[in-house]
Amino acid sequence: MGTNYYLDEVLRRYSSSFDLYRDYSLKGEKYPAYGYFFSLGEKYVLKKEATLWSIRAYEHVLFCETDTITIDYIKHLYDVMESHMEPDLVRKGQKYPEKDHMISYLTIVVISKNTPDEETIKEIRKFRFDKGYLFNFRGHSEGGFLCACLDSQKIITNNRAKRLKKMFEDVFVYLDKKAS
């Protein structure tokens, strides 16, 4: 199974909730895909002009493909999250996110042809990114990291991306059934 084949099925599942962009470029680096989700919740009295409160939640997912994931590659992707995804996608170049921003989930999904060694797996599980804005009055961002290994059909995540694990495992099951 090739990385494109797996990625296509993952993107098909994301397409019901996310705006998806193929061949996405972020600060001059190309990625096979990027997904964006936005949710607005608000409470108002009688009419929308009398809003009591409003919250905005976002999710940004950057998809990557590689033959083998390494510790250096994980460090590079952490730098991408910290130096490009967070300032450009969350804050849009400003000092803080917009008013009523509650949370932005930043997720990196790596589709790897090969399963990494134990040391690299530990590094994936230790991956941590969390940033608050204005003492969290303007919300915060948190980073998730998921690696789908095609050769072993193993999904490795950090703590923040565990919620995605089942869906990515289901993609393997679906593609296996489809192939037989």
Image (cartoon, grey):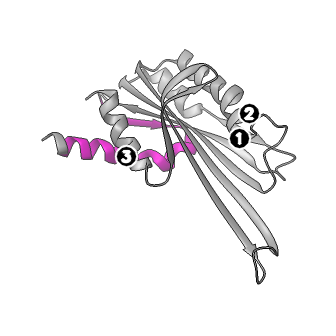
Q: Which residue is identified by label 2? A: 87
Tell me the tag on residue 12. Answer: 3
Is 138 in the magenta? no
Whether residue 132 is situated above or below residue 76 in the rendered picture: below
Please state which of residues 52 and 174 is positioned toward the viewer in this rendering: 52
Q: Tell me if residue 153 can be seen.
A: no
Say which element carries label 1.
helix
Q: Position of residue 82 (x, y in %)?
A: 69, 29
In the rendered structure, the answer to whether residue 24 lies left or right of residue 89 reads left
Question: Residue most toward the top?
Answer: 72
**Which image quarter is the N terminus in?**
top left
The amino acid pointed to by label 2 is Pro
Q: Are marks 1 and 2 in contact (CB under 8 Å)?
A: yes
In the rendered structure, the answer to whether residue 102 lies left or right of residue 159 reads right
Tell me the tag on residue 21. Answer: none
The amino acid pointed to by label 1 is Val
- Within-10-Å neighbours for mark 2: few <14, some 14–19, many 20+: some
Could you tell me which residue is drawn at 52 percent across and 47 percent down?
19
